[in-house]
Structures are given as C-alpha cells and as structure tokens.
Image (tube, rainbow, N blue to C red):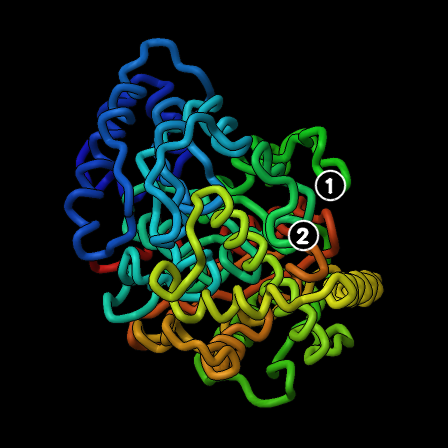
Amino acid sequence: MALAEYETLDGLALAELIAGRQISALEVIDSAIARAEALNPKLNAIVFADFERARACARRQDPPGPFHGVPTLLKDMSAGAEGMPTRLGSAMTPARPADHDSVVVARLRAAGIVPLGKTNVPEFGILPTTESRLYGPAHNPWNLAFSTGGSSGGSAAAVAAGIVPFAHATDGGGSIRIPASCNGLVGLKVSRGRVPQGPDATDRLLGLSVDHVVSRSVRDSAALLDLFAVPDFGDPYFALPAPDSYLASLHDAPQRLRIAVALRRPDGSALHPQVEAAIRSAARLCESLGHHVEEASPAFDHELLAQAFMTLWAAGTAYGVRGLARATGQTPSTVLLEGLTFALYERGLGVSAVEQSWAQQTLYTSARTAAHFHQSYDLWLTPVLATPPMALGTIDVEEQDLQKAFAPVIDYVPYTAISNGTGQPAIALPLHWTQDGLPVGVQFVARHSAELLLLQFAAQIEQAAPWSKRHPAI
C-alpha cells in the first residue's frame, strides 16, 4: 500500500481491506511504522515505540477480532499496556513496563487492534498543551510552531499526520476535545461512567476524567465506543444503557433538533473573530439541515464552577503524586516535578475533606442545571477553545505561582471543563480552518448518556460538510 493511500483511510476502511485480503495486516502495520519513522522526528508525538511487537502481532494468522491489523497508539496516561511503560509525562515515574493491560487496552487488543507505542503528554495531563520537561513539546502537523493541544496532544498529532487512524485519549477538562480542535479531528468526550477505567483505577480525577479516542471519522469513534461501552463491575459510575451498536445506528439521522448556541464567552465578552466565524458557520450549517438554532446557554455560575473544578484538579494531582511517591520511595520536589505540577501538588495537599465535598457537590448541582437546560434544548453548540491553537511556549510549565501559571489556561479553555464537571458527553468536530491553515473545532454538548444522539448528529454534519480530504502539509 502506498503511504499516500494509507493516510487517507480511517480504521474501518483499513479493517475492511485487511478482512477482504486486499492487503495484509503486516503491510498496514509497516505503513504505519514507516510514517511514524518519517514524521515523528518533526512531531515528537510518539515517546515510546513498540514496533517489533506490533509487527509480530500483525503476523498472526488467525484474526482475533473485527479490527485485525489496524494500528493505534496509546496515550502515556491511563492506558496501561503489558510490556510498555506509562510515565504520565513525568520524570518522577519510572520507565517500568506494565505486566498487564488496562480494560480499555485489553478491549482494543481483543478487537485485533495493534498498539504501536505511547504518545506524548504534558506532565500528569495538567495542561491544554503538550509540552513537558521530560518529553519536550509535541508539534502541530498543521504548523510545527503551534501547540497540538493537551493533554492528548501526542495522540492527536499522530492521527492528524496520518500515522494511525485513531489513538487512545483521555479527557479530564477537555483533553480529547482540545487536541481534536487543534489538529482537525473528531474528539468525543463520553458521559461519566460510559467507559470503564479499571483495573488499576476506578475513578480517575474524582469523576472528571474519561477515556476514549481521537479519530478522523465519526464512524471510527462510534465503532470504538461499541468496544469500550460495556460496564465493568466495580465501577463507581454507570451511564444509562448503551444501544446495541452505536456504529449500526449512525445511518438513522436525528429528527429536527433544538440547538442552543453560545455566541459570546461565559463572561459576556466577544469571541475571537476566527472562533466566532467557526461558530456562526456551524450554526448556519445546522439550520440548513433543518434544525432550529437560537442563542442560549445554561445558567451556570462559571466562577463557582472554576473554583470547584480547580479544587478537585489540585486534590487529584496531590493524590496521584503522593501515591507515586509511596510506590517509588521518592520525595516530590521540583527536581522530579515541573514547577507548575509541584505547586498544584502542594495546593492539593491543603484541600480538606470538607473543601473537596463542597467542590463535588457544586459540580453535581451544575449537572442538574445542565439537565434542566436540556429539557428545552437537545444540543448546546459552543467553541472548543477561545482562540485558534496557541503557539508553543505560551505556558510556562516551571511557573509556581498558580494564578500566574493558569491565567493563560483559563483564558484559553472557557467551555470544555464544564461537561467534565457535569458528566455530559460532548463532541468536537473539525468544521473551520483559519486563513493561516490552522484548525478551529466546534463543540456540541448533549444531555448525560446521549452519545447516540451526538454521534448520529455528528455523522449528519460530517456528510454535509466533510473534512476527510483535509490533510496537513507535513
């Protein structure tokens, strides 16, 4: 298979070619590895390569699943994989290979999907850009001087560059949707409780974080959700039952929907011109498909939400760092941790049980506000980011003054963390590019457990305004 042809195909298309014996699984894996070896020196998207084991897996004669031979990459967080280290982008984490798979990775392997390695992340997944002291910056394939977003930035860069058709990602404050927006991809953040996170964790980041993928096509995101959305006993949260198949249901177009659109930032200020252009264009597209669109937003107290979110983010960081310290016998310090991470860890140590309970109850209350809003509106259309992708180096990972360190972060991501707090599903779609050629995604948010509606709607949007022929010059 010519490399140019490989990069144009999504995962389901590759699986169909392999199943039809038009190409072998090994040829597909070799194509992926060739692209990785050619492009990763520019991108720094892959931080651990497991290419020979991937080739050995592809040589197996008996296809173990419907995606036999389709390559993927795993984020260097959450996706524990036998034989691979998971370092969380931190020098504090030993480069020790895992002796077992996480539930998500086990389900990928059972479907025949072949992991090629691990992808770049910011330290502990804290930032909406992928730049760490340990790994260095991941570069956006649309323009190498710009950020890939974070924290699933390495995964998104690899998918956008055509190395793999989809890659594992997690989302605790926008970490699937932000990289999808920055790289021109589909990024579905699922409902709290939809995808299991075991066996080593049952509730990553106090209910804020979920697992799924970044992908080139809506149908790949749907097909992978079919693999993942099976409850695992012992999970602390459960979403409402999933349909028999998200993928099989994509051909059913949604009925006329009521869509609310946010045309200003949460503080009432104007959107960036390119972001506003993306939102208004998306709204017109929705109207052209017969949906009703009007300006409206849930009545959140955004300042209170931000305080609650950062309280839990700090507590979760402290919990993770302290657990790692106990497991490795190390003492957290700015030698082992970036300055920003260390400061957030120290802030988290000071979070009391009462303060954590307040934060969680505040987010639960916001979930009821969202539920009330969705009695009137099926979807909420918002920006993913306040601006197009930021330049690399905008955020100082060594800054220990948290207010100063997070000022550009809070300004950059005013919308994505809301649905992590409320537990709702949301999807980023690549519907706009700036005059300079940088992607600007838009976000659609649905009521809790309504992934099916989001995916059916996204498939309708994809058909009306396809993005599959857009590829970065790299």
Q: Nearer the viewer, residue 314 or 35?
A: 314
What residue would you read off at disc 2?
A: 207
Q: Nearer the viewer, residue 272 or 168?
A: 168
Which residue of the protein is positioned furthest toward the top in this rendering?
62
Q: Quadrant of the N terminus?
A: top left
Q: Nearer the viewer, residue 98 or 373?
A: 98
Sooner in the amino-acid sequence: mark 1 or mark 2 = 2
Q: Looking at numbered disc 2 in the image, what kind of residue is underneath it?
A: Gly
Q: Is residue 137 above or below residue 436?
A: above
In the image, taking residue 104 as reference, residue 144 lies left or right, namely left
Which mark is drawn over residue 218?
Answer: none
Structural distance between the alpha carbons of marks 1 and 2: 9 Å
What residue would you read off at disc 1?
A: 236
Q: Quadrant of residue 337?
A: bottom left
Q: Is residue 240 above or below residue 417?
A: above
Q: Residue at x 44, y 46 (%)?
A: 329
Q: Is residue 258 visible?
A: no
Image spot of residue 354 (x, y percent): 78, 65
Image spot of residue 33 (x, y percent): 22, 36
Which residue of the protein is positioned furthest toward the bottom in this rendering?
269
Q: Looking at numbered disc 1 in the image, what kind of residue is underneath it?
A: Pro
In the image, taking residue 383 as reference, residue 109 lies left or right, namely left
